[in-house]
Image: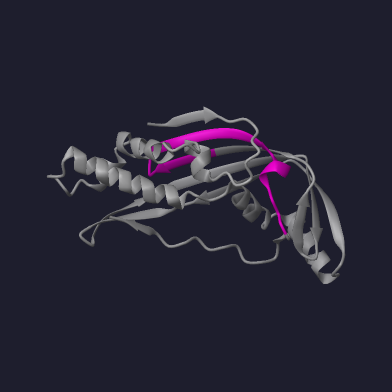
Amino acid sequence: MTTTAAATATTAPTLSAAAFLFGAGDDSVQQLADALKESGVVAAATSGLRTLSKAGLDAVGGQLASVAHGLLDIGLDTLLLEGWRKFADLHTAAQRTRAALGSSEVLDLASHSITSTHQPRVELRLDDVPLATVAFDLSLTFAVKAAVATVRDGRLVSLHSGVCDVEGTLGVGDKPLASRSGQFQLPLMVHLGSGLPLLGDVAKQPPPAAAG
């Protein structure tokens, strides 16, 4: 099953990739479980268990969906800001303002796109014996328009305006699970707090989680 929908502007600053693709309701995990089952991902991952009942397959699929859903609990604002750490104009402004502490720069960011890709993996185990590893492919593209950013002391401290179109897809190999597009007002989406360090290392992807 491929889920396709359209979203309008939202005031939720911490909307996660999972909620964006499957909704924020109580049935979000079940939607992912249904997609995993209907796409054949669960059957492929458990192909070595020929005696597994339908109830057993549903249990495996539910557990796989629950763990995968947790790995997709990444805020869209976080992903966008991580992408901006690599944005050349912001990086250059960060270097200049960090070299002259107390200084700040306001940048008119032209329309641009940031693509964030992630490959979370879930290892299925039966009685602590590895059964299969399911590798997900998450891709999110942010098309940013008319954003004005302020950089101070090497940090991105505010976004004054802007609209962001988002397109997201989730799949396993050549099997699509979900896709969605939406639009967000950047001041509502991005909360910077004390500022985002633009010259720090990008966070490393966590190791795969295990289900079973």
89 lies left or right of 140: right
Residue for point 42% across, 41% down: 171
Q: Which residues are magenta?
A: 168-193
Side (left or right) of 159 relative to 190: right
The residue located at (77%, 64%) in the rendering is: 154
28 left or right of 17 in image? left
Front residue of 140/24: it is 24
- Picture coordinates of residue 199 (x, y %)? 70, 65
Q: How is the image coloured?
A: one colour
Q: Dividing the picture into quarters, in which one does residue 198 lie?
A: bottom right
Q: Residue furthest front?
A: 26
Q: Which of the image's four quarters has the N terminus? A: top left
- Residue 98 in picture, x, y percent from top left: 80, 68
Rendered view: 18 above or below 104:
above
191 is within the stretch colored magenta:
yes
Main SS of the magenta part reads strand
Query: Is 93 or 66 nearer to us in this picture?
Result: 66
Q: Residue at x 28, y 43 (%)?
A: 42
Whole-percent x, y for residue 148 in the image: 80, 46
Q: In the rendered image of this protein, does residue 172 appear above or below residue 196? A: above
Left or right of residue 84: residue 212: left
Residue 193, quarter of picture? bottom right
Q: Say which quadrant the C terminus sits in.
A: bottom left
Q: Is residue 69 above or below residue 25?
A: below
